[in-house]
Every structure is written in C-alpha cells, then in structure tokens.
Image (cartoon, rainbow, N blue to C red):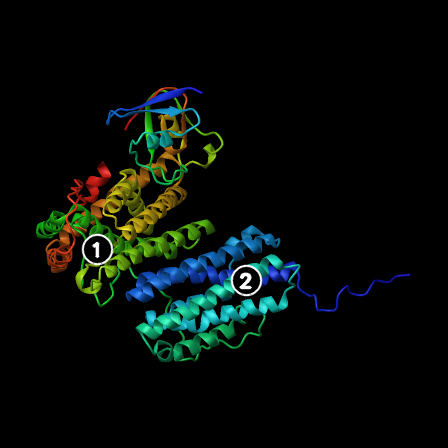
C-alpha cells in the first residue's frame, strides 16, 4: 500500500499517511497537532480545505458526516474521516 | 359442532396493544411536557443547588419520554399521532404545575404531586399488563419507576438541606394540583374525572412565561462577567488576572478553567430556554437539547467542585456572571442558539480545549484535566447538535447558511453593545475578585516547590481573537 505525504501550507509541517489510516490519525502518529474533537465527522473541528492532491472520505461512513455538497465541491474534507489518495497539501 | 377451547390461562387478559399504547401515551405526553417545563424552570431558578438538580432531572425526564415514545411506536401507534397529537388534558395538567409562583412552589408541586402521580400511573400499568406479552414495556417502566423514586428522594433530601419546610409551605398548591389531576382523570386517564377545582383559591393563574433574564443565587454578589476576555474595557480586571498568570501559567489555567466551567451555566440556560421557546420541533430536537443543557449544567458543577476542592468559599471569591445570558434577552430564540453555536464551534476549531487540556495535564492536576477531557467530548456533541438543528430551523440551503451568518453577526453586535453599555457598572469590575484570589493562591503556592517549568501559553485571550485563529 503506498504512503503519501501530507504538507501543511501554513505551519510547514509534513507527515506521511498510509492508505488505510485517516489524515488525522497520521498527523497524531507524527506528533503534529491538528484541531479535532469527535473523530467521527460530526463536530467539524477538523474541517480543512485540500489545496492540492486527492483526499476522500471513507465511503462506509460518508453519509453520516456533517459536511455539505458545497463544501465537498470546494475541496473541504473532515480530516478525521478522510483518506489520502495522493500526496496532499492542506490549508493548515 | 361449534365450540371453542377454554381460555388457556386463568388470569385476566384484557390488555390489548391499543389500550396499552393509549395509556403509555398519557405518560409520554406528561413526561415530554414535564421535560420542557423543567428546562424552563431551571432557567428561572437562581438557587444553585435546586438549579443544577432541576437540570439533571430534566435530562432524565427526556430519557423517560424517549423510551416511552419508542415503545409506543412499537405498539402500532401512528407516528403522526405520537408526535403531533398530544392529549390536551395532560398538557393542561403540566401547564398548571408550571404556574407555581416561584421555584419553591414549583418544586413542591412537581416533586410532591406530579411525580408521585406519575409513579402511581406506572405502577398501575405494571399491575394491569402481561409480563410476557408486554415484557419490553415492563423493562422500560421499571427503570423509569426507579429513576422517579430516586428523583423524589434526592429532591426531598436537597430540600431538607437547603430549604426545610418547602413541602409544608406549599401544601395549598399541592392540594390544588392534586385536585386538578383528579379532574383530568389522573395521568392514566382511567379514573373518573372529578370536577375541575375552579373555586380553589389558587386556581385561575395566568399561563407560565419563561423569564428573559436570569438572576444568580443570592449567596453570590451581583456580577456581570466572570473572566477578563468578556469585557475588553475592564483594564484593571485584566491587570489583576495577569498577576495570577505571573505566578505560573499552569496555575492560571487551573483557575481559569474552573471559573470558566462554573460559568458555563449560561450556555445551559440558553439551550434550556430554547426547549421551551420552540414548542413544535421534531422529538430528537428536544432529546438533543436536553442533553446539551444538562451537559452544560454538569460542566458548571465541575467548575464548582474544583473551586470548592481548593477549599475556597466559592460564593465569596468567584464571580458568577449573568451578562452572557442577559445580553441575549431581546434576541429571538434561534439567534441565541446561533450565537452559542458560534462560540462553541469556534472554540473547538481553534483547538482551545485541546490546548487547555494539555496545560492542565502539565500541571498534573488530574481532576481538572479529567473535567476538561469530558467537557471537550461533550462539546463536540453539542457542536454537532447545533449544526444539525440550525440547518433544520433555517433550511439546508445557501439561504439558510446566509441567514445563520446574518443572525450570528447581529447577535455578536448586540452582545458587544451590551458590554459597552455596562462597562462602567460596578458589577462589571473583576479586579476585586482577582486581587483577593491572587492573595489566596500566592499563599497556597508558598509551600509548593518550584519545578522550573515555564509554560508559554497564556489563557487571557479574547474570545473573538480565539475564534479568528
């Protein structure tokens, strides 16, 4: 399974994310502090815009997330529930 | 030959799904309306011990109503009838209970009459129904009975400690409510209705209306604000707080989080008032808001417990503000909810709770860290509630989003104006509190060795600045 690199544009931090882990889990593993709360995609604390690359919400739970179609179209993702599908740059 | 076998068992078996669900609906309507009434009376009650108990009982009542509603729907009862057609006599009965002229009369009526009447109805139901055919209801009702008995005992113990004689002083009101209950045929609806007690001296009061401003327990001095970030004009208050910070940032965080938690009561009040103000929302709206309000009251109790735990005379030393609720007084209910959502959502997005938890852990204050950790988990649920129900109320559309932004911006302006208008009130000054706290904290720290750790983060950050982060 490929590992992708996540880059945070404001803090300059970088960390790798495995294909089967969420972006938030990968950040925690790397010791990068990101705002989060519920870990279930409902509180929206971790809502973040993907500036480049591909991240998709876990399809098994996509219907339960508190994110609307406009936000998805604007490349926002809930990092606690999103999986990387390429290298990424996040608006963080 | 036309014959039938004898009944397969001797005992009376005249309970049917239809009369079981009708009976339970009486109880559900009373519980639902009692929950909303307890929420409103929680807002209107200033006495701290009664106030927090009403919040807990309100939440437990929401769980009772939810369990009954679920079971009624099991029993072939049409969803529309459960959620939209309430039994007028039961609504009337709870509405009479709400007319208690002050919190003590209200408590006397609810815990002296209504809850015992509910208990009687549940116990009668257990006597009437079949333990096999209706076993799921029996499981629910037994738990509700246990909770109600606890609620009555707990409130009686509290009354004994806080206001002995409350029940004796409200016997006339209890007598009136007993007669009113008999006039609607009891909560079961099975009794023959007695005449309405229209000639009773306490009959005929106007309908209850929730207060648009709150008072605090008389043991506390009148205070508008509780921490310096609320009032940017209070320069002396900010300086006094910074002296506490200078002792140690972790100490400041310990005290800040306890005072802040204690004052979260305003958030509970905003949510509880919404449960009263909105009277025809989907059931889950009330269930979620009951949990939200109870959580915030728990957080307030967490703060109180921490402050007491340091051996402090809380009413004397700690400001208990009313400005956050009272500034919202003129706003429509949805705008209050929007503003609360804005605050809570902003704090989580800024990671404020996470940072505060880390500082409390660095202080090795396990109690405060534990409180903060559970508070943080609760707040995540609240933000989800706010997101869900504001979209429901305003519409899941761009217009709805724009209206939420407009309501929030306007609400923030109203609060800012309130603060500016009251900035010179004596009750707005926090320096006297923090100067006294400084002396007490400094004396406590004298016996604690310096661990040479220096925490850089300072908790004195204006909310608006946190929210922009």
Which residue is depicted at the point 63% across and 65% down?
A: B129
| Chain letter for the residue marked with disc 2 in the picture | B
Q: Secondary structure at mark 2?
A: helix
Which residue is depicted at the point 41% across and 75% down?
A: B203
Q: Earlier in the sequence, mark 2 or mark 1?
A: 2
Query: Where, by quadrant of the figure, is residue A37 drawn?
Result: top left
Q: Is residue B141 left or right of residue B101?
A: right
User: Disc 2 and disc 1: Cα gap in Å?
Assistant: 42 Å
In this picture, is A87 found above or below B279?
A: above
Q: Is residue B96 left or right of residue B227?
A: right
Of tags 2 and 1, which is closer to the observer? 2
Front-most of residues B212 and B308 = B308
Q: Secondary structure at mark 1?
A: helix
Q: Which label belongs to residue B414?
A: none
| Chain letter for the residue marked with disc 1 in the picture | B
Q: Is residue B282 visible?
A: no
Front-most of residues A55 and B285 = A55
In this picture, is B109 found above or below A59?
A: below
Which residue is depicted at the point 59% across and 54% down?
A: B77
Q: Which residue is mark 1?
A: B323
* Percent coordinates x, y for residue A60 in the rendering: 49, 32
* Percent coordinates x, y for residue B34 in the rendering: 43, 63
Which residue is depicted at the point 37% across and 40% down?
A: A43
Seen as rendered, the residue at the extreme right is: B1
Q: Which residue is mark 2?
A: B141
Q: Quadrant of the N terminus of chain B?
A: bottom right
* Percent coordinates x, y for residue B259 in the rendering: 22, 54
Q: Quadrant of the C terminus of chain B?
A: top left
Q: Is residue B45 left or right of residue B455?
A: right
Q: Is residue B403 visible?
A: yes
Circles 2 and 1: CB atoms closer than 8 Å:
no
């Amino acid at each position: 399974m490929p590992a992708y690199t996540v880059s945070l544009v404001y803090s300059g931090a970088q960390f790798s994310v495995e294909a089967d882990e969420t972006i938030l889990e990968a950040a925690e593993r790397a010791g990068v502090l990101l705002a989060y709360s519920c870990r279930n995609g409902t509180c929206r604390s971790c809502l973040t815009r993907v500036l480049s690359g591909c991240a998709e919400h876990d399809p098994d739970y996509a219907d339960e997330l508190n994110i609307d179609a406009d936000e998805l179209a604007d490349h926002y993702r809930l990092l606690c529930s999103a999986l990387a599908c390429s290298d990424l740059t996040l608006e963080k | 030959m036309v014959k039938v076998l004898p009944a397969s068992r001797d005992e009376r078996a005249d309970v049917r799904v239809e009369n079981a669900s009708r009976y339970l609906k009486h109880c559900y309507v009373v519980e639902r309306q009692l929950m909303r009434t307890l929420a409103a009376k929680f807002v209107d009650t200033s006495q701290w011990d009664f106030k927090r108990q009403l919040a807990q009982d309100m939440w437990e009542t929401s769980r009772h109503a939810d369990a009954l509603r679920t079971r009624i729907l099991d029993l072939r009862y049409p969803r529309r009838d459960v959620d939209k057609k309430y039994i007028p006599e039961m609504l009337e009965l709870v509405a009479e209970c709400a007319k208690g002229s002050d919190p003590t009369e209200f408590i006397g009526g609810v815990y002296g009459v209504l809850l015992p009447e509910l208990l009687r109805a549940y116990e009668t139901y257990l006597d009437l129904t079949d333990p096999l055919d209706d076993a799921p209801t029996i499981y629910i009702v037994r738990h509700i009975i246990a909770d109600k008995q606890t609620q009555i005992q707990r409130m009686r113990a509290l009354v004994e400690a806080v206001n002995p004689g409350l029940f004796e002083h409200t016997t006339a009101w209890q007598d009136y409510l007993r007669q009113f209950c008999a006039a609607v045929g009891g909560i079961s609806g099975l009794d023959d209705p007695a005449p309405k007690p229209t000639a009773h001296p306490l009959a005929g009061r106007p309908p209850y209306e929730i207060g648009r401003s709150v008072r605090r327990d008389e043991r506390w001095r009148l205070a508008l604000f509780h921490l310096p970030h609320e009032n940017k004009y209070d320069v002396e208050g900010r300086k006094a707080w910074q002296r506490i910070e200078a002792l140690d940032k972790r100490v400041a965080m310990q005290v800040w989080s306890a005072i802040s938690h204690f004052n979260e009561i305003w958030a509970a009040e905003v949510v509880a008032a919404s449960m009263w103000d909105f009277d025809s929302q989907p059931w889950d709206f009330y269930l979620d808001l009951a949990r939200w309000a109870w959580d915030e009251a728990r957080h307030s109790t967490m703060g109180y417990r921490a402050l007491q735990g340091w051996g402090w005379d809380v009413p004397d030393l700690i400001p208990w503000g009313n400005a956050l609720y009272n500034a919202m007084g003129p706003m429509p209910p949805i705008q209050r909810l929007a503003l609360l959502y804005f605050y809570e959502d902003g704090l989580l997005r800024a990671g404020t709770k996470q940072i505060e938890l880390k500082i409390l852990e660095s202080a090795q204050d396990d109690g405060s860290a534990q409180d903060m950790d559970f508070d943080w988990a609760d707040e995540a649920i609240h933000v989800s509630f706010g997101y869900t129900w504001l979209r429901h109320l305003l519409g899941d559309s761009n217009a709805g989003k724009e209206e939420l932004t407009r309501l929030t911006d306007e609400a923030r302006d109203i609060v800012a104006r309130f603060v500016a208008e009251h900035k010179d009130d004596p009750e707005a000054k926090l320096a006297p509190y923090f100067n006294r706290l400084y002396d007490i904290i400094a004396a406590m720290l004298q016996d604690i060795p310096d661990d040479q750790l220096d925490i850089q983060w300072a908790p004195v950050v204006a909310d608006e600045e946190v929210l922009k982060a």
